[in-house]
Image: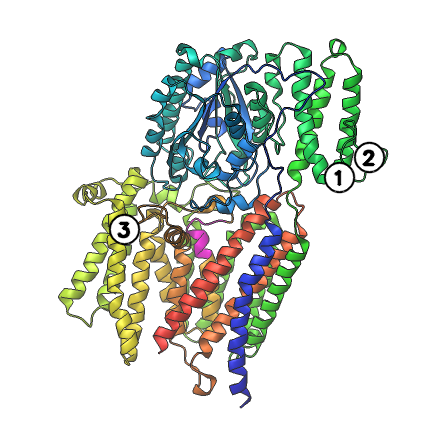
Amino acid sequence: MHRHNVLPLSTALLVAANLLIPVAIILFAIGFFPYKPFLPGLAEYKSFEYGPPPQAPFDRLIFMVIDALRSDFVFTNNSGFQFTQGLISDGVAIPFTAHATSPTITMPRIKAITTGSTPSFLDAILSFDEADTSSTLAVQDTWLAQMKAKKEGKLVMYGDDTWLKLFPGIFDRADGTSSFFVSDFTEVDNNVTRHIPDELRNDDWNTMVLHYLGLDHIGHKTGPRGPNMIPKQHEMDGIVRMIYEAMQTQPHLQSTLLVFCGDHGMNDAGNHGASSPGETSAALVFVSPKLKSISKPVKVPAEFVEDFQLYNVVEQSDLAPTLAALLGFPVPKNSLGSFILEFLPFWSERHDKRQILLRNARQILDIVAATYISSSPTGGQYNLDCARPGSVGEELICEWQNISISVDKTPVGDMDDGWITDASKWLYKAQALMSSVASNYDMSMLACGGVTTALASTLAMYVLSTSTSTTALSLAPFVLITVLYGVMMFASSYVEEEQHFWYWATSAWLLYLTIRSNLRMPRKSLAMGLIALGSMRLVRGWNQTGQKFAGEPDVVTSFVAANPPLLWCLVTATYALVTFELFNGLGDIPAVVSGSVASGLATSAISFKLAFTNEDAPELVVGLARTLVDIFDGPSLVNRARAVFLGLGLTSIYPLYSLLLSENKSSKEKAMRTLHHLYTLFALTQSRVTNIPLFLLFQAIYLCLSGLRLDVTEITTSSLLLQFSSFFAMGGSNAISGVDLSSAYNGVSGFNIIAVGILTFVSNWAAPVWWTSALNLLLIQKRQPAEYGSHSVYRQHTAILTVFVTVTLGFVMMACTALRTHLFIWTVFSPKYLYSMAWTLGQHMVINVAFGGLLYWLGRT
């Protein structure tokens, strides 16, 4: 009788624990990712004791962003920018490396470049939503808004439509292109270039923004050393040539400044989002014939250096005050940038130089004062006890007041260059201080999130403790894995290289299962264990992921991609296995029909994958694969993908019908296997072609596990380990740069947040979802005594998963809270929290609990 009362209560508590998880995540995120406050309105030139603002040397701006343009792509020997290097050598172009702070993603980088401020990390999330309008800069001060306010010409933009989302209504002419269809290397750039000749002939604009995406897309697909990279660099160099020659020949462009730069760089794997030197080192080049009068000789090309910091290094935020002086408008209100001193020789008069730096300093001083003190200045001075400043902000203000007093007391004609050094040092110190003010954390919300997670953990642990078939000994491996993983969250290096924990833990678990089963089935279990361990070893080496060894040799680069015929043999074998399983699963219907359905699905799926690979990585399509591409040539990729999805949907009707209406146990098991293999075909569609053979290895491991007679705890532990290890094996990581968008638009002709979101999740979590489906087949075979209830197996399974999710989420929250002032808080721990959100809300609640629960219910009803 006692057990009859406990089990319903356990179910209710387990539901409550899972419902608390999103509440905890939201509460913690509100405290951890708040929007940064900013000063509203446009800056205006204030009356200044040193006279009117200095005369600007330029009246037009062409601002050209080449997405992911790493510094060495332009400045070193292995560059395709020969014309640009010639301009640098001639002194009409001045090169820099612009440091891009993390997250190195387009939207926050554009915000930093245009406002001069440090964007919120929340922008990293919003940048994936093309429909988002909450992150607009319409009401913030930017150099675009200042150029608009000058009313000296129109603003035009061509390229990445992120600019249109950030600056609604500011451009008079624009043509945006989507940044997320990363298979497009050419059209996305041709759509920009086709507008340039006409715009160079027009004289009705004062600002032209160009944003090229092709080089970034090439990096995502083939890395920085891919075969398409140098030709793309030649193409971009040709655009620079076109613009520069127009500046020389067109009278209305004589005072035009061309600035071209990368919004960020890329790592050795071709990705970005984190903080490796390659990702944070973007090229920045100022171009104009006028620069010859102030430029200094530099070595061209530059010697390659490991940290990619070539020539002088500036912050991206330094662009805002520099453009303000060069084009004649006030420094944007929220800028933390420091004027780039290399351009100071444009003004020969000392009072002009003094004005530029003093206006820049006073603008930053306003931000420092607004952050650290509440009083207003009196006569330009703040009433502070500078003998004992109360904060680093007050100390900085006092330091500036001392510099300002010395400048005011010194006649302009008597000043030397020492004051420039003092002012510049203060600007950099203020910039470093205000940029390091990472966030105004809401500690009460952080605490609420942590407490809610602890409550969810307690409920889940209670449910697990009341399970009738779990013992402390059976749970010991699971507890050890959970505790070790949680402790690991406090070390940045372990977070960056998390995949090794899962690889070794999974291998150790498979070895443990082999040894344990060998006692009962000596020959059979030993053979299956060796096959599972061997398959796991190949899985571990398939893709090199993480931060430290990204881009290093792995199975894919060394063997699979290097031998396209081998790749297509493995791909064909994978599709053949799935087709065979589907044919068997549909065996209750006539063989002609089941054969036609299975072969039709396989043909449409393979034709899509061939066509997609031909667009995505054409170097892999050779020999017979090239012949098949030509044979299947015709429909668009969108229609091909839709045909696959439609076929999968229609085919799933039959097994679902069998599950709902049939009472035969074997028919139900066959129908469940059929649904699993239909998902496998969907997962193959959403996976990179080089990852498709991994599903052969997954199937081998699954078949070995299915023969080891695992109990519920062992099935759940296996599922947990294999979900995480397979995620990293497919190329996943804890960096935002690890998000794969290549299959996000399969079957989608335009941006749809729901469709693109689902496809993005499945393409990145294809393998973990596969393991949820596969091990559910083992789970539904388990039987419990009738008095315990028909769903006690699933309750125990879910309780174990919920304990792991809540406990480890709590560890991540504690790490983020305790290390909130850590150097790597925004580069390592914050992305880890975002991934924890995806694992918890997406993989655990949607896939393991909801989807897995549905499959279990279908298989047991």
Residue 484, horizontal then vertical, whole percent: 59, 60
Which residue is the site of mark 2?
384
Labels 1 & 2 near each other (Cβ < 8 A):
yes
Question: Among all residues in the image, which is located at the extreme right?
Answer: 387
* Relative vertical location of residue 371 with respect to residue 173 in this rendering, above or below: below
Q: Is residue 531 visible?
A: no
- Whether residue 335 appears in magenta in the rendering, the answer is no
At horizontal 53% and vertical 91% (from top left) the residue drawn is 1
Residue 49, horizontal then vertical, whole percent: 72, 18
Which residues fall within the magenta stretch? 725-733
Amino acid type, mark 2? Leu
Labels 1 & 3 near each other (Cβ < 8 A):
no
Which residue is the site of mark 1?
373
Amino acid type, mark 1? Ile
Q: State which tag comes first along the sequence, 1 or 2.
A: 1
Assess disc 1: are there few (<14), some (14-19) or many (≥20) residues with their C-alpha within 10 Å of its C-alpha.
Answer: some
Q: Is residue 204 left or right of residue 17?
A: left
